[in-house]
Image (spheres, rainbow, N blue to C red):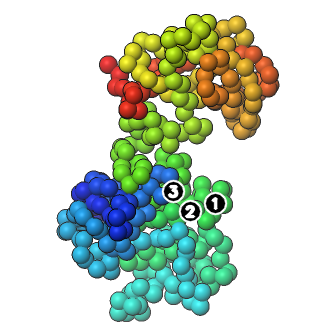
Amino acid sequence: MCQVQLKNIRKSYADNDVIKGIDIDVKDGEFMVFVGPSGCGKSTTMRMIAGLESISAGDLFIDGVRSNDIHPADRGAAMVFQSYALYPHMTVRENMGFSLKMAGEKRSKRDEQVARAADILKITDLLERYPKELSGGQRQRVAIGRAIVRKPKVFLFDEPLSNLDAALRVNMRIELSRLHKELGTTMIYVTHDQVEAMTMGDRIAIFNGGLVEQIGRPMDIYRSPANKFVAHFLGAPTINFIHRPAAQTDSGSGVVQLWQQVAHSTADAVSIGIRPEHIHLLPAGQGVAAQVLLVEYLGDSMIVHVRVQGCDDLIKVKQADSRVSIASGDTVGMRVDLDYVLAFDAAEKLISRS
């Protein structure tokens, strides 16, 4: 078990500040996910923890020991990269045991630890194969196994599933979650995929522009995002933002009717956020009038894009029953679940409910 603490960590390249002072406390045995858009600093932070990037300022503690200047091999961290980085001339067994061989472990000890890791990952029958004989998912399992045999204090995963196809990513998400429960080791996982973050993390840290916007349990953040950036980043399809209508806006327009529906919680709001699943479509003549412009069928549900008079953008509605007959050009009504409306102030911060 291992706790990882980042205290006011900063990273600069010449005059370019890429990590601007972040504080993260990863608990013993926790699965922490760093998530955010490309270029936000999450992988750089991971590499600083691993020792592959120097720390410009701040303190990194691994298992209670300040680790800023400790050699990467001595930090007790094992990293799994986006690229599998397997030696093509070595078998799976040799790839997985190579770090132990370099550390001077006896052959019998290496084989024992490789066999245990292979059993955990369900790749025992692949041990004598070469990387070229493996699928992408099998290669990723080997890369993970290479980390397991080292018995690290903390696992570091840097977008390990991004090279896999969609179906295999789902399977590997399940496998990694199972692996975490079985090993109980602290894991830090970097991804730009919010679905991976929501489904895998005990807690998630949302990065943006070299800063951490919010840390918490996935559903807590989803329901109470700190600001508009977080609200927009989490959720598929993305949240709808509706700006407060100007005073001269026609009182009969749809946007004014929407604001009137949610006025009890938005007195100080500049904008409101409504997630697509919290809007319900009604027959024409009921609720707020809207015109259907596009319908996307997803099998178990459908996404309906509608235009509401006075709203700058189309509004997305997630309809659970895809058997309902709705077509482009239809006029429908809308009703909002008032308990789930998010209100934001002029600084784009969430206005807490009373």
Tell me where residue 18 appears, x and y as whole percent: 38, 60
Dots 1 and 2: beta carbons under 8 Å?
A: yes
Dot 3 amino acid type: Ser
Dot 1 alpha-carbon crowd within 10 angstroms: few under 14, some 14 to 19, many 20 or more = some
SS at circle 3: loop
Q: Position of residue 287 (x, y in %)?
A: 62, 10
Neighbor class of circle 2 (other Cα within 10 Å; few <14, some 14-19, many 20+) is many
Marks 3 & 2, CB-CB < 8 Å contact: no
Q: Is residue 53 visible?
A: yes
Q: Which mark is residue 168?
A: 1
N-terminal of the pair, mark 1 or mark 2, is 2
Report the side of 46 relative to 287 (left or right): left
Q: Position of residue 96 (x, y in %)?
A: 48, 81
Q: Which secondary structure lies at badge 1?
A: helix
Give the image location of residue 200, x and y in percent: 47, 51
- Corner quadrant of residue 312: top right
Res 187 seen here: no
> 272 or 66, which is in the foreground?
272
Which residue occupies the foreground of this view, 118 or 326?
326
Q: Is residue 103 above or below residue 201?
A: below
Q: Amino acid at mark 2?
A: Leu
**Earlier-in-chain disc, 3 versus 2:** 3
What's the distance in space between the residues labelled 3 and 2, CA to CA? 15 Å
Task: Please name the residue that numbered disc 3 is placed on.
Answer: 38
Which residue is found at the position 50% from the left and 52% from the top? Answer: 37
Residue identified by numbered label 2:
161
* Figure quadrant of the C terminus: top left
